[in-house]
């Protein structure tokens, strides 16, 4: 399971971090398992990252003595953290470290993708590699049969089980006669009550932070009934069905089954944002900006609702400003639609 510690709130907080004095050190570690599959290889890469950062602090003549002293302290803290507890690298294909003693900032984030970038010393955290990866959306899978329900939730495809519902529902039998009919009605009532309770448990867990999408795994004869019992807030987030064993599938089995649905939903959101951009330009409403100059002007006026950026385009300042004003940000890969806009465009609020 790939780890991704990036959140929209975290990106916004980092984008707004500007120490009154001192600098921010941003470090990036490539842990691509194809290159760094063993512990010794990862240790070598960590040492190399620290050495590069130490040389940069030493050789940067623009830094004051106080700034160099603070940055060396940041590196010593990171070395101490590694020596005493080590870095939690489980599931990470990359790591980002942001440190600034004067700003009381020390943050280590696991990334779902490897990052190749030299250390950066600047007035603010260098978050461009993080925005290119982007925060994973929160998703849930609800698996339910006649007696068991499981709720698995997490960012992206990092689904973990968070709720388990088990009810004592009698099994059907094949004896005939009046008693069998009565028994069958009892079993159907018990099964219905179980589905209803499972839907209520799911809503109780999710209502505080509704997920981007919900996937349901259930026997064919139950799935329509269960979806109908879900709260309307959950029904409107239904994004697909999983063909999976409800009781015996592992969390990893569920994650694999969910991956295609999540990828499809992400692509659909990007399609919708690009369609909205084309619609606003086509209608001539003035609620779209094209190219860096127009987008920056709109950001200064806090008019940006949706920012679209080509992943290969350097637009960190624009992304930081968009996040700071709670705009929706899409960093797009392999989407030629942005080329005619100078690789950056925006849909505006007004």
Image (spheres, grey):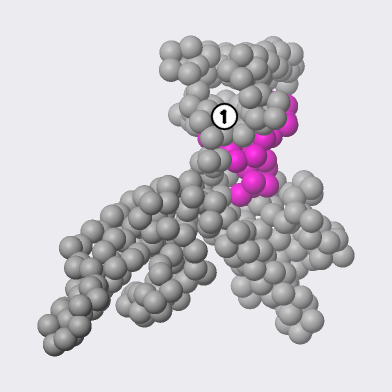
Q: Residue at x 35, y 64 (%)?
A: 144
Per the image, the residue denoted by label 1 is 97
Say if the magenta span includes residue 343: no
Q: Is residue 96 left or right of residue 276?
A: left
Residue 348 x/y as whole percent: 66, 71
Looking at the rendering, in which quadrant would you find the C terminus? bottom right
Q: Is residue 281 visible?
A: yes
Residue at the image position 75 percent from the left and 54 percent from the top:
333
Which residue is painted at 63% across and 64% down in the image? 264
Q: Is residue 123 visible?
A: no
Q: Position of residue 112 (x, y in %)?
A: 60, 41
Image position of 269 with respect to 100: above or below: below
Secondary element under disc 1, as helix, strand or loop, is strand
- Residue 347, compared with residue 334, is above or below; it is below
Residue at position x 49%, y 68% in the image: 241
Q: Quadrant of residue 261?
A: bottom right
Residue numbers of the magenta segment: 109-134
Vertical arrangement, residue 323 with respect to residue 229, above or below: above
Q: Position of residue 171 (x, y in %)?
A: 23, 68
Foreground: 272 or 2?
Answer: 2
């Amino acid at each position: 399971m790939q780890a991704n510690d990036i959140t929209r709130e975290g990106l916004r907080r980092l984008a707004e971090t500007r120490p009154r004095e001192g600098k921010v050190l941003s470090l990036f570690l490539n842990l691509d398992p194809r290159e760094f599959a063993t512990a010794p290889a990862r240790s070598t890469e960590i040492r190399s990252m620290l050495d590069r950062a130490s040389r940069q602090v030493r050789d940067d003549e623009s830094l004051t003595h106080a700034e160099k002293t603070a940055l060396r302290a940041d590196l010593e803290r990171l070395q101490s953290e590694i020596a005493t507890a080590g870095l939690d690298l489980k599931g990470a294909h990359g790591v980002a470290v942001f440190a600034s003693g004067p700003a009381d900032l020390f943050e280590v984030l696991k990334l779902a993708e490897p990052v190749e970038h030299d250390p950066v010393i600047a007035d603010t955290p260098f978050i461009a590699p993080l925005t290119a990866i982007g925060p994973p959306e929160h998703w849930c899978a609800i698996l339910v049969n006649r007696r068991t329900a499981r709720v698995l939730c997490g960012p992206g495809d990092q689904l973990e089980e968070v709720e388990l519902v088990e009810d004592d529902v009698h099994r059907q039998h094949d004896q005939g006669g009046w008693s069998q009919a009565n028994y069958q009605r009892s079993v159907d009532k018990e099964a219905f009550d179980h589905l209803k309770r499972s839907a209520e448990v799911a809503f109780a867990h999710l209502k505080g932070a509704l997920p981007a999408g919900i996937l349901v795994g259930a026997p064919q004869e139950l799935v329509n009934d269960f979806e109908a019992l879900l709260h309307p807030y959950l029904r409107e987030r239904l994004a697909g069905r999983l063909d999976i064993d409800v009781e015996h599938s592992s969390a990893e089995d569920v994650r694999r089954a969910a991956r295609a649905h999540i990828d499809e939903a992400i692509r659909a959101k990007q399609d919708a944002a690009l369609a909205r951009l084309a619609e606003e330009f086509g209608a001539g409403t003035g609620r779209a900006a094209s190219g860096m100059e127009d987008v920056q002007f709109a950001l200064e006026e806090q008019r940006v609702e949706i920012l679209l950026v080509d992943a290969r385009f350097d637009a960190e300042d624009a992304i930081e400003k968009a996040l700071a004003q709670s705009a929706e940000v899409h960093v797009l890969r392999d989407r030629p639609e942005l080329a005619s806009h100078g690789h950056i465009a925006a849909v505006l609020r007004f």
